[in-house]
Image (tube, rainbow, N blue to C red):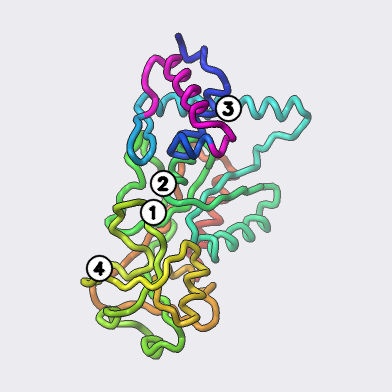
Amino acid sequence: MALTDASLTALRVFREVAERGTLTAAATALGYTQSAVSRQIASLERAAGAPLLERRHDGVRLTAAGRIVLYRAAAVVDQVDAGARELAGLPDEPGTVRLGWFASAGGVLLPRALAALRHSHPAITVTTREGSTATLIRALRAGTLDLALLASSPPFRPPDTETPPLELRILTERSLRVAVPASHPLARGDYVDVADLHGQRWIASPRAAAGDSATLGVWPGLDERPEIAHVARDWLAKLNLVAAGCGLTTVPVALAAAVPPGVRVLPVRGGPREQRRLLLARLPGPLPEPAACLAEALRTAALSP
C-alpha cells in the first residue's frame, strides 16, 4: 500500500492522537471508541508501510516516519477544510492566528496583548486556548496552533527534542517572586529573605506528571520537605488562598498587577537567583504577517511594567 491510500478520516484521527498524546484522549475528543481510533491508526500505518507511533506507558510518541506523516496530514486536513469552507460560501480565514498559552499568562499578559492588537490590527482574529507545555508543544507540531506562549525555568532546556527544532523567541526574563498574605509578618518588609521561607505553608499546583520533582508554587531549592497546605491548578484560586492567609505561593512578576487585595508580591533575597523566561514557540519557517503582528504585540506586552 502507499500513503495515498490513506483515508481523510485516518489522517484526522492521527492528527488528533499526535496532539492529545494518548489514544484514549483522542477517542474522547473525537467521540470515537478507543478501538476505532486504534483501527484508524493501524490502517494508516499499513498505508505508510512503517510504524507511526511508539506506544509508551505515559501515552504515545511519534516515530521518525510519524513526524513526516503528521506534517503531511496537517497540510492535507487544512487544505480540505479550506476547500469545504469555499464550497459552502464561507470566507477563508487568512487573518486568523491560533495561540496557545500557559495558565498564568491569562492573568495580565494575554489580555493586554490582545487588546493592543485589536486596536492596531482590527482585521486580525486570534483564537486561544490554555494548556500545559507538553499539550501546547504537541498542538504546535500537529499544526493546530500557530504560536505558543511557554514558561521556562533553569536550566532552560528546549521544550522537546523532536525534529525539526522549534523556533523559540525569548520575550522576557525576570525573577520569580513570592506572594505573601498582607497580614503575614513577612509582608512587613520590601523583600523576603530566603531563610525566612523555611517552615512556611505553601499553596502549590498539581504536578504535571508522576515523578516530577518540581512543585510549582513552592520556592525552588528549599533544603527541606515543604509543607503543602493546598493544591490548586488555577493561579487566581492560589492567590485568593494567599489573601485568605492559607499560605504562600510563588508568582511570576507579570502577575503582580493582577493580585487580589490582601496579597503582597515580594522579591526574595539570598540563595541562587530564580529566573523565569517567557518564550514564544512556533514551527520553523516563514511567519505569516498576522502571526508576526501577534508576536510583536506579545513581546511589547511582556516588556511592559
User: Reading the chain from its start, which is encountered first: label 3 or label 1?
Assistant: 3
- Classify residue 207 by image quadrant: bottom left
Specify whether 232 is left or right of 117. Answer: left
**What residue is shown with label 3?**
77
Which sits earlier in the primary sequence, circle 4 or circle 2? 2
Residue nearest the viewer, comparing 113 with 6: 6
Please determine whether, in this image, residue 167 is positioned above or below residue 205: above
Q: CA distance from mark 3 to mark 1?
A: 30 Å
Q: What residue appears at the point 62 percent right and 48 percent down from the top-left corner?
A: 127
Labels 3 and 2: the sequence-earlier one: 3
Q: Position of residue 235 (x, y in %)?
A: 49, 66
Q: CA distance from mark 3 to mark 4?
A: 46 Å
Residue type marked 3: Val
Which residue, given by chain and number where applicable, does mark 4 sit on? 221
| In this rendering, the label closer to the viewer, 4 or 1 | 1
**Chain-order first, disc 4 or disc 1:** 1
Instruction: Name the disc covering residue 208, or none.
Output: 1
Q: Position of residue 216 (x, y in %)?
A: 37, 63
Q: Residues within 10 Å of mark 2 (few under 14, many from 20)?
A: some
**What residue did someone put label 2 on?**
134
Numbered disc 3: secondary structure? helix
